[in-house]
């Protein structure tokens, strides 16, 4: 029974770890100031950890561009108004191109990235590059590569912001965060490991259940344990089954996670069925109804005799 309790504890921990990982990933927003409101406004739902990264970034930047174009700028000078319109046109050019930096250095965390190791530049970095030059953008990147814009205390940045027609808060509203893991066809390590452990356990239990169904058993431990682990694997698959989410081309479901979830649900169901069958038809091992034995014995002439014994129980 102690072994069974440990197995159950491991099963519960793996399911909880998988669900917790999924929850943590979904909590990270695309922007520090307005979160994921852009996704809700344009696509009518919250993004998930399966949402295509480019769709998430383009949706955010499209929303912010529209928001900034609608703001009252009557207090700006003529030059600032012209610069602001130029910046918004550049922003539109940037997000429609769909080339964004990647967060290579912070696993499982959404964070800004000014210029990545491939040379891809963030939205604000692109605006600076196009108006102040690549060298200025590189200098800023050397000091503030993974920094939030409002935390960048730098005179070069402040002067550029002042001339851009934006406020620093508006620039921070533009600045996205970037996820480090692929989200279009991806299985999280926690879910993968959990599924492997539970699958191995249930395959073993299925084998033992099959043997006990055919030959009988003196204990109900295996089928009872199988009922619990089978239900656990079904729960694991159901909780991690990916939801459909909106993309620019329609709806999308993470195929790898979907397939693994279906395997979990299917294998868990088979364990549940075999365990139930074993429990219902459980019978004790049959004792042999007869036995026989061949033996030797010494005779009076000092030779060996051969004997045969047969016993049958009634």
Image: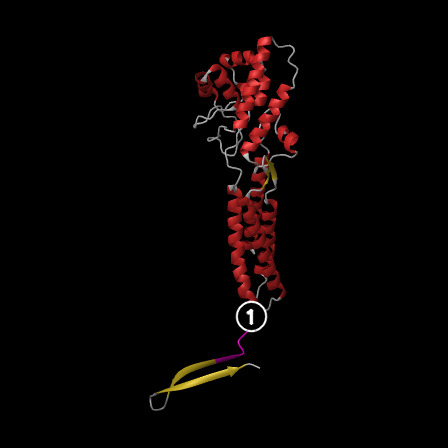
Tell me the magenta residue range: 284-291
State the predominant SS element of the stretch in magenta.
loop
Residue in the foreground of this view, choosing between 29 and 209:
29
Quarter of the picture holding the N terminus? bottom right
Where does residue 36 sit, x and y in percent of width and height? 61, 29
State which quadrant residue 149 falls in.
top right
Check the image and report above or below for 78 versus 225.
Answer: above
Tell me the residue that label 1 is attached to. Answer: 285
Q: How many marks do you count on the picture?
A: 1
Left/right placement of residue 41 relative to residue 104 reads: right
In the image, residue 242 sits, relative to residue 72, either above or below, namely below
Across and down, in percent, residue 300 comes to 36, 91
In this rendering, the answer to whether 148 lies above or below 192 is: above
Q: Nearer the viewer, residue 106 or 294?
A: 106
Quadrant for the C terminus in the image: bottom right
Q: Nearer the viewer, residue 116 or 127?
A: 127
Image coordinates of residue 264 in percent, x first then y, are: 56, 51
């Amino acid at each position: 029974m102690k072994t069974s309790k440990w197995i159950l504890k491991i099963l519960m921990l793996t399911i909880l770890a998988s669900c917790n990982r999924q929850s943590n990933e979904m909590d990270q927003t695309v922007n520090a100031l307005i979160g994921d409101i852009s996704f809700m406004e344009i696509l009518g739902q919250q993004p998930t950890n399966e949402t295509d990264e480019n769709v998430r970034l383009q949706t955010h930047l499209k929303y912010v561009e529209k928001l900034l174009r609608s703001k009252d700028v009557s207090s700006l000078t003529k030059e600032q108004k012209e610069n602001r319109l130029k910046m918004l046109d550049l922003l539109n050019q940037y997000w429609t191109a769909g080339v964004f930096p990647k967060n290579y250095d912070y696993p499982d965390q959404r964070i800004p990235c000014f210029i990545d190791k491939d040379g891809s530049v963030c939205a604000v970095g692109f605006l600076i590059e196009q108006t102040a030059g690549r060298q200025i953008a590189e200098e800023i990147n050397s000091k503030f590569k993974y920094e939030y814009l409002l935390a960048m205390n730098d005179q070069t940045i402040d002067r550029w912001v002042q001339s851009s027609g934006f406020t620093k808060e508006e620039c921070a509203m533009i600045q996205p965060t970037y996820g480090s893991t692929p989200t279009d066809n991806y299985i999280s390590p926690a879910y993968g490991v959990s599924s492997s452990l539970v699958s191995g356990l249930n395959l073993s239990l299925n084998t033992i259940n099959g043997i006990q169904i055919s030959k009988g058993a003196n204990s109900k431990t295996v089928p009872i344990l199988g009922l619990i682990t089978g239900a656990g694997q079904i729960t694991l698959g159901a909780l991690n089954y990916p939801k459909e989410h909106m993309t620019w081309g329609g709806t999308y479901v993470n195929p790898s996670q979907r397939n693994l979830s279906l395997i979990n649900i299917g294998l868990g169901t088979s364990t549940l069925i075999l365990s139930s069958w074993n429990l219902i038809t459980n019978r004790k091992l049959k004792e042999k109804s007869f036995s026989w034995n061949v033996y030797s014995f010494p005779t009076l002439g000092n030779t060996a005799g051969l004997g045969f014994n047969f016993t049958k129980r009634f």
